[in-house]
Amino acid sequence: MSNIFKSGPRNIRQRLLRDIILLIGIIIAALIALGLYMGGKIREQASATIISNTSVIVKKKFYRFTEPVETYLSIGYQWGRNGLFTKLDTAELCRIFIPILTTHSYISAVSIAGSDGNEFFLKRDGSKWLTRLSAETNTKRTTHLQQWQENGHLLKGWQEKTDFDPRHRPWFLKASASNPGEICWTDPYHFFTAGKQGVTASVAWHETGKQTLFVMAFDLLEDDLLSFLNSLEIADQGHIILLSRNGSMIAHNRSVQLKSIEDSPPVVQAIKLWQQGNKQNMHALEFSINRQTWWAGFTPLKTEGPSGWIGVIIPENKIMGNVKRQWFRIATAASIVLVVGIFLALFLVRKYSYQLRDLPQQKIHNHNFENELFSLIAAGESTSLEFKSTIRMNLKTGKSGKEIEIGWLKTIAAFMNSDGGILLIGVNDDGKIVGIEADDFASEDKCSLHCKNLINTHIGPEFSRFIHPKMHQVQGKNIMVIECERVRKPVFLSMGKNEDFYVRFGPSSLKLTMSQMAKYLDERR
């Protein structure tokens, strides 16, 4: 037999269970979706915030570190324009700059040079100070070196032959190519006197009314920059890098542990992605290396004009260790959703409970079939129960009659248009089990197929899933039990060109007119 004849009715109790399970499923799906969405958002926002905040903190600390250098250069620019450095007097310049370099030990040297080739240079020499005074006369360079005590007392002096020309040094070339008064930073280069790597900040000017270009510069050793970077607190395995405005590396806080920048793939990849983004201000740049996620941020050292850059690169697992409190917010939100879902489920159960109190029986359970059957028969015909003696046989005439088939089809249509019900075929009006043997079907399958064809023809195959015929043997006689569900859509009984609408009215089926049907369906919604 067809599967539709084997399935039991999906009555209101089953629908209640279905709806609650569906509701719980929706709640669980909502919680999972919320967790995934919020988790992703928190991950992105937390990473971006931490990277951004770290970049700003590093930027501020670097600004405090370099601020004295730029301040003294700005002061030197004003002094130079007013003629203070026209004559490079070594003793006088030592009295000016030794206190500055003593106060700010990370400034390793100061230089003042002119476009005429003259230069003054001062640097530490252990516990003493070394000066160099270079001059060019008749295309010949003379270099006079002196050693000084901190109190300005000259210890000794001597001359050296050298082809050193300050006008060819990176700091002079950078400042002379810039606007007067603009402070410039070089890329890392090799210092001529110190013999070490470093960067130089410089500024250029023309003395008022004169053509000679002067440049003043302060040297910072790479070792001092690294000491500064290493003093900054950043996540374990994190990287801090200083970049020139054209993107070349100035300093890297882990360069001591690394032979070259190529030994740090996260730094290489972060710089590459930043450069691909046209060197923009990026607060949260995400990338992966060897299945480990990294976040990087790049912030300009100055908000206006050309500037170097600060880069911060941190592994995500170090960042996420700081955002556990964010997951508490997710758990709180999920708990709220769950509590709301439980209240909705309770409301649904309460709503259905009122319908279940007086709900007519729509199903006879197989495990207790005979007891339930006899209880129904004893209660008699009602809005949800009707007896029919046969499927097609007219017992009065002894012949098969179409009116017999239409009779029980009316009942099925009326059940579905009302609150559902059970049709017992093989039970007479007095509640006596007479069986359907009088219908003379060759087999149970033939009987079930005949019922199925009648239902499809007169009610419609689209409603077959709401109708559940079952054959049972009781007291040695076969009876047909047809369980009918309530259907929301109107169900019509078709007879030729006519379509009639039936509902249950007490123990009988009542045919409604078109206007009655319209009113009934409107109230039934």
Image (cartoon, helix red, strand yellow):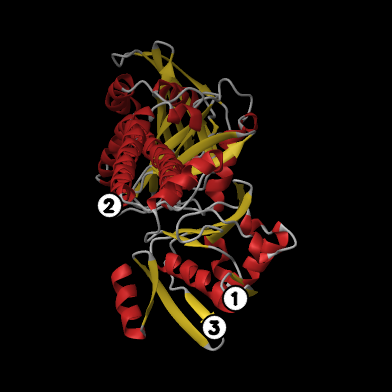
Q: Could you tell me which residue is drawn at 39 percent across and 49 percent down?
A: 213
Q: Could you tell me which residue is drawn at 32 percent across and 49 percent down?
A: 352
Q: Quadrant of the C terminus?
A: bottom left
Determine crowd level at label 2: few under 14, some 14-19, many 20+ residues with C-alpha closer than 10 A: few
Instruction: Find the residue positioned furthest to the right.
Output: 442
Q: Give the residue number, with chain letter if any, for mark 3.
A: 495
User: Residue 15 in the image: x percent, y percent?
Assistant: 44, 51
User: Residue 495 in the image: x percent, y percent?
Assistant: 54, 83
Confirm or deny contact between disc 2 and disc 3 (CB under 8 A).
no
| C-alpha gap between disc 3 and disc 1 | 23 Å
| C-alpha gap between disc 1 and disc 2 | 135 Å
Instruction: Find the residue positioned furthest to the bottom.
Output: 497
The numbered dot on residue 208 is 2
- Camera-near label (1 vs 2) is 1
Between 12 and 170, the residue placed more toward the observer is 12
| C-alpha gap between disc 2 and disc 3 | 115 Å
Amino acid type shown at disc 2: Thr
Between 447 and 53, the residue placed more toward the observer is 447
Position of 38 with respect to 478 (left or right) is: left
Position of 270 with respect to 57 (left or right) is: right
